[in-house]
Image: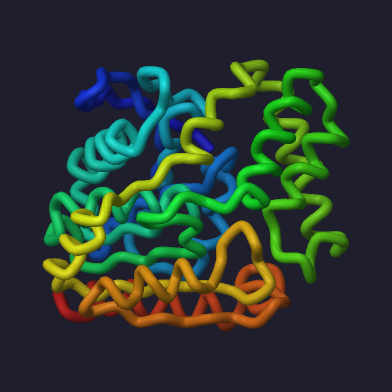
Amino acid sequence: MRTQTLPYAGPAGGGTVEYALAGTAGPPTTVFLHGLAGSIEDTRPLASGVPGRKVFAHLPGHGASTGPDPLGYDTLAAAALAVADHEHATAAFGVSLGAATLLRVLSRTPDRFERVVLYLPAVADVPRRPEAVAPHRDLASRLAAADVPGVADALLRTQPLAVRDSPIARDWAERRAEELVAEDRDPGRWLPLATAVPLDPEGLERLRAVTVPVLVIAQEGDPAHPVQTARRVARALPTARLEVFDAAGALWGHRAELRALTTEFLGSIGNLLR
């Protein structure tokens, strides 16, 4: 997938953000943001069926996107907004880290997007539990050793318990492990993000100013993305709709239902503008 880069400026310094375009012209234009240690390729299956133009961005520290150390949510939000503004995005879809980045954006500019999907939010205003951070620390040490099988195992530990041994999850983890080792970048670059929170108590309260529809998606049996975090986020957003999938996982076990859900939610922007 051909990518391009765009400079951005944030409160801690600037960098460049890498992104790719797909889809057809016309509403909506949706920006997709991946999870921690994720990539553009990881978000593409989630865009299947979503109408309009699709903008897939690499957050700073991922792919060819750069940013000042240590990475923080202000930097990620600045990069995401730079791409969204440049490409006139009307909707946003964030996965885990991407969802947390959108929470930071919504707490500062609650009316920036017309619709928002928060897929598997891992953290809001309360830090992750140590057992949720542990796979990322293990991932950093395995990357430092260029241990592809070890990296794959660490990645699988970020997935729902019920799917970790499934062939499709293992194939994904092995592919992504090979990509990460081949990148040959600082293996600890994500660790500040693994322990950071996108919202302070005031930020959580500011979410009550959001008036646009927000779809929050969670799944049972996923220690890295606790359902209680999704419920906390949904309670703070006056217009939120919460959907919780079972332990088979939203993407791994219920892809058709997930596709129908997100297509209907995001596609309604285009219907309103026709």
Residue plotted at (78% across, 35% down): 151
Question: Between residues 254 and 55, which one lies in front from this camera angle?
Answer: 254
Residue 13, compared with residue 191, is above or below; it is: above
Which colouring convention does the figure follow?
Answer: rainbow
Residue plotted at (74% across, 35% down): 138
Question: Between residues 158 and 262, which one lies in front from this camera angle?
Answer: 158
| Residue 23 seen in render | no
Q: Where is residue 271 in the image (x, y as percent from the top left)?
A: 23, 80
Q: Where is residue 11 in the image (x, y as percent from the top left)?
A: 20, 26
Quarter holding residue 73: top left
Residue plotted at (47% across, 64% down): 119
Please state if 46 lies on the left or on the right of 174 as rendered: left
Q: Position of residue 136 (x, y in %)?
A: 65, 39
Residue 217, compared with residue 32, is above or below; it is: below
Please state if 56 lies on the left or on the right of 191 as rendered: left
Please state if 50 lies on the left or on the right of 46 as rendered: left
Quarter holding residue 79: top left
Residue 225, compared with residue 22, is above or below; it is: below
Residue plotted at (82% across, 44% down): 153
Q: In which quarter of the image is the C terminus?
A: bottom left
Residue 88, compared with residue 1, is above or below; it is: below
Q: Position of residue 259 (x, y in %)?
A: 52, 75
Quarter holding residue 185: top right
Question: Between residues 181 and 221, which one lies in front from this camera angle?
Answer: 221
